[in-house]
Amino acid sequence: MGKRLIAGGLAAVVIVLAIIVLRTLSLAPQQQSLEAIPERDVDVDAAAANLARGLTFETIAFGGDRPVPAEEFFALHEHLVASYPRVHATLTREVVSSYSLLYHWPGRDAAKKPGLLMAHQDVVPVDAGEWQHPPFGGEIVDGVLWGRGAIDDKGSLYAILEAVELLLAEGFVPERGLYLFFGHDEELGGPDGAIPGADLLAARGVELAWVLDEGGFIVSGMLPGSDATIALVGIAEKGSVTYQLTVDMQGGHSSMPPRHTAIGILAEAITRLEQNPVPGGIDAVNEEFLEALAPQLPFTVRAALANLWLFRPLVEAALSGSPPMDAMQRTTTAVTVVDGGVKANVLPSHAEAIVNFRIKPGDTAVTIREHIVRTINDERVAVSKSDWHREASPVSPTDGAAFALVRNTIGEVFPGIPVVPYTVIGGTDSRSFYPLTPNVFRFAPFRYGPDASSIIHGTNERMEVAQLADAVRFYVRLIESSGRPDSGPGDD
């Protein structure tokens, strides 16, 4: 009897090991089936000069009580008209909310739903760091273009217009119509740009086949244990909500303090929140991300990712140890502002903290508040929400023709680079267009290394000029392919 149990146990172990190995081998790196298309001739020097000039306009999204720098936006608009004469002679152009730009390029087949390419004109303010070249100088030095907005997001804006101008010069007319939308307040959430822009199209009864905005990049060396290059395509994005924690109690002299002051009570509440984050884990989007990512990783890691049925708790724990990866699997908690007390010998009568949560799809502002109250479990701490918040976006499908269009275009212009769907941690203007289509994707065709996250909103934002040519080629190919029966969306 004992021998039969041992034999049965060994057989079970062998079966489990066989399943693990087979599932792991099924995620081995696959040969790209797409071939690179012939390289399109792009006048990269002219494109770079246009973008360089565009970076000199200080189209800063200040927010608050600061006015919109109107003259800077108007000067940018004039430069776009002068730089892309065919675009402005052929496409219709409307101004939304004084500064955002909406273009329409009718297609040959009016029955096909149009696509929408997006970018934004505004940039974040310049930080206090020391720039190697002036942030609004638009300088090109040794093949590198320096300036605020080079990556986020004027690079995409100019590459899109370069692509359309090039196609117009060739006499191309798209099978499927195309809209372009360039918002002016994306860095503020798009309240006067993308939101009314989407409402305008909706009021006209426009239904879109797909939307492509900023979000993911082609990145290298960002994966633990691997120097692989991957193309990140956002299929969803997190929301954001801010809660204020407030403690009010009687003040007095510090010589006779209670056991816990207002600041002490608040500190304990903060500690509880940080030690007990919002529950997370590997959801459907994460599974797609990990499945696409796994072939680029070492065998042992690939084995764990290919067999989440067995290793899910271990993988989730490992992801929790990396802030960028942990942010993908849960709503994050960030205590960003603390205020309380007026003098060393005076008991504080008021203390408050600001806590920002980046909402993962599946959570909401309401469920987060419930988590805060339940976790703190102290009636002395009042919890209130800021006036503004945005929920997490819907999740766009990856099994349809619209995602295939983006994936295939990446494969043709950047052959051999795997496409990995993921959740964008920040926010984009594209979320406002979900009422017009479920197919909202986020990808900017630029290559970056591990330092990308530190320069997008940081000091010394820059782009290699050679990348601009590839970006133009990407948008050209996307527009050319979007109406073809074999590669364009089939949901018309």
Image: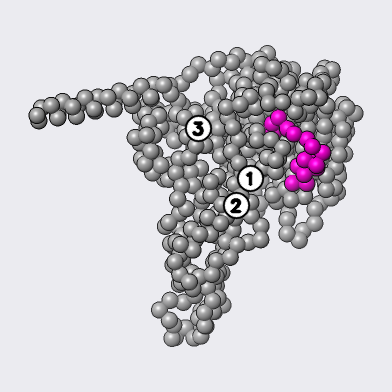
Q: Which residue is mark 2?
A: 240
440 relative to 157 in the view: left or right: left
Residue closest to the eye, 404 or 300: 404
Q: Quadrant of the N terminus?
A: top left
CB atoms of marks 2 and 1 within 8 Å: yes
**Mark 1: which amino acid?**
Gly
Give the crowd class for mark 3: few <14, some 14-19, many >=20 residues within 10 Å: some
**Mark 2: which amino acid?**
Ser
Give the crowd class for mark 1: few <14, some 14-19, many >=20 residues within 10 Å: many
Residue 410, image x and y in percent?
A: 62, 24
Seen at 84% across and 20% down, the residue is 169
Region in magenta? 195-212
Residue 437, image x and y in percent?
A: 69, 35
The vertical placement of 343 against 147, above or below, is below
Q: Quadrant of the C terminus?
A: top right
Give the secondary structure at mark 2. Answer: strand
Q: How far apart are labels 2 and 3 at the CA level?
A: 23 Å
201 relative to 141 in the view: left or right: right
The disc at residue 288 is 3
401 in magenta: no
Q: Which residue is mark 1?
A: 427
**Mark 3: which amino acid?**
Glu
Q: Quadrant of residue 434?
A: top right
Q: Earlier in the sequence, mark 2 or mark 1?
A: 2
205 in magenta: yes
